[in-house]
Image: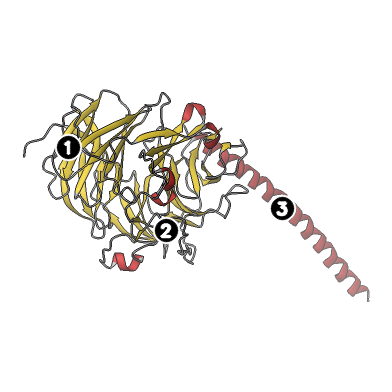
Amino acid sequence: MTVTKMSWRPQYRSSKFRNVYGKVANREHCFDGVPITKNVHDNHFCAVNARFLAIVTESAGGGSFLVIPLEQTGRIEPNYPKVCGHQGHVLDIKWNPFIDNIIASCSEDTSVRIWEIPEGGLKRNMTVALLELHGHSRRVGLVEWHPTTNNILLSAGYDYKVLIWNLDVGEPVKMIDCHSDVILCMSFNTDGSLLTTTCKDKKLRVIEPRSGRVLQEANCKNHRVNRVVYLGNMKRLLTTGVSRWNTRQIALWDQEDLSMPLIEEEIDGLSGLLFPFYDADTHMLYLAGKGDGNIRYYEVSTEKPYLSYLMEFRSPAPQKGLGVMPKHGLDVSACEVFRFYKLVTLKGLIEPISMIVPRRSDSYQEDIYPMTPGTEPALTPDEWLGGINRDPVLMSLKEGYKKSSKVVFKAPIREKKSIVVNGIDLLENVPPRTENELLRMFFRQQDEIRRLKEELIQKDIRLRQLQLELNNLRNSSKNC
């Protein structure tokens, strides 16, 4: 197969998305004063849904993230309540696609945790998770919810393993153990029957997640893959990575034949990671560079040339990561087809960027808003684990985008487990991983030792008093 090179010559073709433009929200509609994490891990550190915005924050010892109601724009107070139960830095956060107040987080403390955000947001710091999931032996870098099944969550750790969790029982039900290095990215296809991963071992894999079987594998020597995304129902994958000349590059693949990419193209000579985002409703692909302020966008088709360059949104402020609003949270009256939440670390700013199709009519534009995956799951965990595949339950943005999901998360009731080694419960006492964490643990233990000593002294005094009373009773009985 020959690799097709894309042409950057302007192609005058009919497209309803040819004039899509990016619009930055006014300053009063941004989120200011947010202590965005300085962690260099290549993740977005941001997650958004129709109700809340979550951002991983900088914290001294342990890990935390903010959860802000979307209507609460403007300056965020320094003492704003946080979710701060992790004992190591938080590396990834993702909202449940079917329950809009349930969020998953993973951390350097080797755990995955499920949190339930109260109605109206946090009023005080949240330290106790709804569910704590322990199964990885090293830090956990990625979490991903299943796109059509409720309560199925995937986590990828630095132990090179992917665990599939059934949150109905709070246990891992499958371990995918086919990677030989750190997993960089995971992406599901539309119905969640296939999982694709990129790995530090320079391989791109298509995996059947329930069996863990690798269906296709590409050894990317000339295109070092970093990120991958499924292109809807096209049976295509798009990867971003680095060429042999250390330039940023994209490649398009057929999921059923990864022997060679269909096309590959160099983007530019910058060093920041390229994050790909795909909108299956408009068939638009967005490429955002970490460390620069540009977002390029393309239209994707099944015929050659496959990718058609549309335009580029430019901004002088560099982005650390980007959150993406689900379709049912967009403003359809403004013909908004995509919305980013851009993290500007230097300014402590979260900046919404709306991608808008210019239209003169104020009526609902059905041609740019087809039926889209909604907030109802298509399968239960047992159905999916039993081998059933089902497409997402679709909704209309004209009628149903304000409907709330009826799904409720119920944490499983289970006995507390322990792994005791030399009298220490390893699940209760996660070993410190940073100097700050070690100091915090040391001072906490010193306080506990002091408290126990005082308690021991009080009990010793009480014991002596009881002995004296007992002696008095004996003496009085003898005298009688």
Q: Which image quarter holds the N terminus?
A: top left
- Seen in the picture, residue 427 relative to 182 is either above or below; the reply is below
Is 359 placed left or right of 82 in the picture? Answer: left
Query: In the orientation shown, which residue stands out farthest toward the right?
Result: 480
Q: Are marks 3 and 1 in contact (CB under 8 Å)?
A: no
* Residue 228, percent from left and from top: 26, 42
* Residue 454, percent from left and from top: 72, 49
Identified by mark 1, the residue type is: Cys
Identified by mark 3, the residue type is: Glu
Q: Nearer the viewer, mark 3 or mark 1?
A: 1
Residue drawn at 41 percent across, 27 percent down: 318
Residue for badge 1: 220
**Residue closer to the observer: 153 or 288:** 288
* Residue 71, percent from left and from top: 55, 45
Residue for badge 2: 399
**Residue closer to the observer: 384 or 229:** 229
**Residue closer to the observer: 208 or 255:** 255
Q: Locate residue 287: give its quadrant.
A: top left
